[in-house]
Amino acid sequence: MSPLPQPDDLASLVLRTDFTDDGAWEAVKGEFRRWDCYYSATFVDDPAYSKATVEQLIDANAPISDEDWLTYLFVADAATMTDVERPLLAVDLTREPGRTFRVPPRWYADVSANLTIANMDFAEFADAADESGTYRGFEGT
């Protein structure tokens, strides 16, 4: 598998791994536009990552130089494409490699911005996920 691509400056990588429904992928990006967070994402639509597992994505990050190494990414997988909320799979690539939680586009910008500037850690969002493993904001917000 190719090394993970770099996101644009001050954006997070959103990597498509499910290629069964192009309309669903467009709907995912449409949700980003709806919540005005389209420009905080670098969308990668490369079939080379089709059906990539979390473990494979962690390995694809390993050959990258330390300065370009990604600490997290968001995956648009089969669950993203079929769930009405379009929740992405957030993946920790460094501190607790393989730790995940889901985040619908409605809350993506909060997570992405805070992780991008290292204002908060991945674990803070993962720990705030509900019983389904989905982050939907911190209580009271």
Image (tube, rainbow, N blue to C red):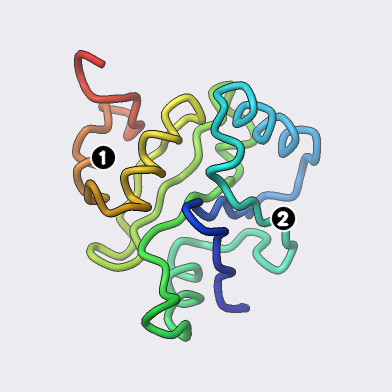
Binning the other alpha carbons within 10 Å of mark 1 as few (below 14), some (14 to 19) or many (20 upward) gives: many
Q: Residue furthest right?
A: 22
Q: Is residue 111 left or right of residue 47?
A: left
**Residue 23 position (above or below residue 65):** above
Distance from Cα at disc 2 to Cα at disc 1: 26 Å
Coordinates of residue 137 in the picture (x, y in percent): 30, 25
Q: Is residue 128 left or right of residue 4?
A: left
In the rendered structure, find residue 45 and report the number of the disc placed on it: 2
Q: Quadrant of the C terminus?
A: top left
Helix, strand or loop for disc 2:
loop
For the point 42% across and 28% down, the residue is 107
Q: Residue furthest front?
A: 9
For the point 27% across and 50% down, the residue is 122
Coordinates of residue 85 in the picture (x, y in percent): 54, 23
Helix, strand or loop for disc 1:
helix
Instruction: Give the residue number, with chain letter if any, for mark 1.
Output: 125
For the point 45% across and 61% down, the residue is 54
**Amino acid beneath label 1:** Phe
* Sequence-earlier tag: 2 or 1: 2
Q: Quadrant of the N terminus?
A: bottom right
Binning the other alpha carbons within 10 Å of mark 2 as few (below 14), some (14 to 19) or many (20 upward) gives: some
**Residue 77 position (above or below residue 130):** below
Q: Is residue 86 left or right of residue 73?
A: right
For the point 50% across and 51% down, the residue is 11
Image quadrant where residue 140 sits: top left
Coordinates of residue 123 in the picture (x, y in percent): 21, 48
Check whether the beta carbons of the residues at disc 2 and disc 1 lie within 8 A of each other.
no
**Amino acid beneath label 2:** Asp
